[in-house]
Image (spheres, grey):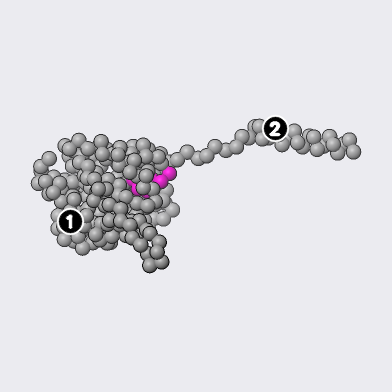
């Protein structure tokens, strides 16, 4: 019996020693919002296909406006296509948006995709809503890095920084981000376009009596604009965009 007891004690002390020398793993740190990252493209190279095709269209052609962002920017060629073809394509606009992108992804694309020969007069930047792993200050820092990289890639460009739109997924966090990034506008090189007041909450009642809240201009997913949302964006931006394209401040 004694040998058995001794063996059990040895096993217990061994386990205790292992627990002391191998403390519980710390939670993973959120990815830095200011570090370029292309992991999602390596996992799925097709994500870059549409953006590469857009860039190819501008080889040896003028590009006066570049729209930089994620799926909301890419959506100009989806729900916003009619407006795009009417208002932006004739003004040599390039859609540099990829669905699902974070600030890290945009930073990588600005550094590694073939954009250096472009000489846009205006860059329209809307990014950050997919940085769900980061806190508001980290997201704002990532957006600031995107602005700096945009200015480095396109010397002399004027930037229209668009507010993150309302959304059900992370409304509180993204509105905190907006409260920070508005200070990035100097109204000389960078201008802030606040769409939030134009996209007011809308409450509706379903046939079974439930109430649902969405925002004006957003589709059923409460995240992406529908055609009316792109109209809100276009109407709000047009006076500033026209002035900047004409060389004004």
Question: Does residue 105 appear left or right of residue 1 in this picture?
Answer: left
Q: In the structure shown, which secondary structural element does the residue marked by tag 1 occupy?
A: helix
Q: Which residues are magenta?
A: 128-133
Q: Outermost residue, bottom direction?
A: 207
How many other residues sit within 10 Å of disc 2, few (<14), some (14-19) or many (≥20)?
A: few
Residue 151 in view of the camera = yes
The mark found on residue 17 in the picture is 2
Q: Earlier in the sequence, mark 1 or mark 2?
A: 2
**Quarter of the view holding residue 187:** top left
**Quarter of the view holding residue 16:** top right
Asked whether residue 211 is drawn in magenta, I would say: no
**Quarter of the view holding residue 49:** bottom left
Q: Which residue is mark 1?
A: 88
- Residue at the image position 82 percent from the left and 37 percent from the top: 7
- Residue at the image position 24 percent from the left and 56 percent from the top: 230
Quarter holding the N terminus is top right
Measured as percent of width and height from the top left, residue 74 is found at 29, 56
Distance in Å between CA atoms under marks 1 and 2: 67 Å
């Amino acid at each position: 019996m004694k040998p058995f007891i001794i063996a059990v004690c040895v096993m217990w002390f061994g386990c205790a020693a292992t627990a002391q020398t191998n403390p519980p793993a710390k939670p993973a740190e959120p990815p830095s919002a200011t570090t370029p990252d292309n992991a999602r493209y390596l996992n799925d190279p097709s994500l870059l296909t549409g953006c590469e095709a857009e860039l190819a269209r501008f080889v040896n052609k003028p590009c006066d406006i570049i729209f930089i962002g994620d799926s909301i920017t890419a959506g100009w060629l989806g729900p916003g296509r009619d407006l795009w073809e009417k208002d932006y394509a004739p003004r040599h606009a390039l859609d540099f948006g990829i669905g699902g992108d974070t600030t890290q992804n945009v930073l990588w694309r600005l550094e590694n995709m073939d954009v250096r020969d472009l000489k846009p007069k205006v860059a329209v930047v809307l990014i950050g809503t997919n940085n769900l792993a980061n806190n508001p200050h980290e997201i704002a820092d990532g957006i600031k890095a995107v602005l700096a990289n945009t200015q480095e890639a396109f010397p002399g460009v004027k930037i229209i920084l668009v507010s993150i739109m309302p959304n059900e997924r992370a409304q509180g966090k993204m509105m905190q981000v907006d409260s920070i990034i508005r200070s990035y506008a100097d109204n000389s090189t960078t201008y802030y376009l606040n769409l939030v007041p134009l996209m007011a909450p809308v409450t509706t009642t379903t046939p079974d009596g439930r109430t649902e809240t969405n925002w004006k201009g957003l589709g059923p997913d409460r995240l992406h604009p529908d055609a009316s949302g792109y109209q809100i964006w276009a109407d709000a931006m047009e006076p500033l965009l026209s002035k900047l394209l004409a060389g004004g401040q």
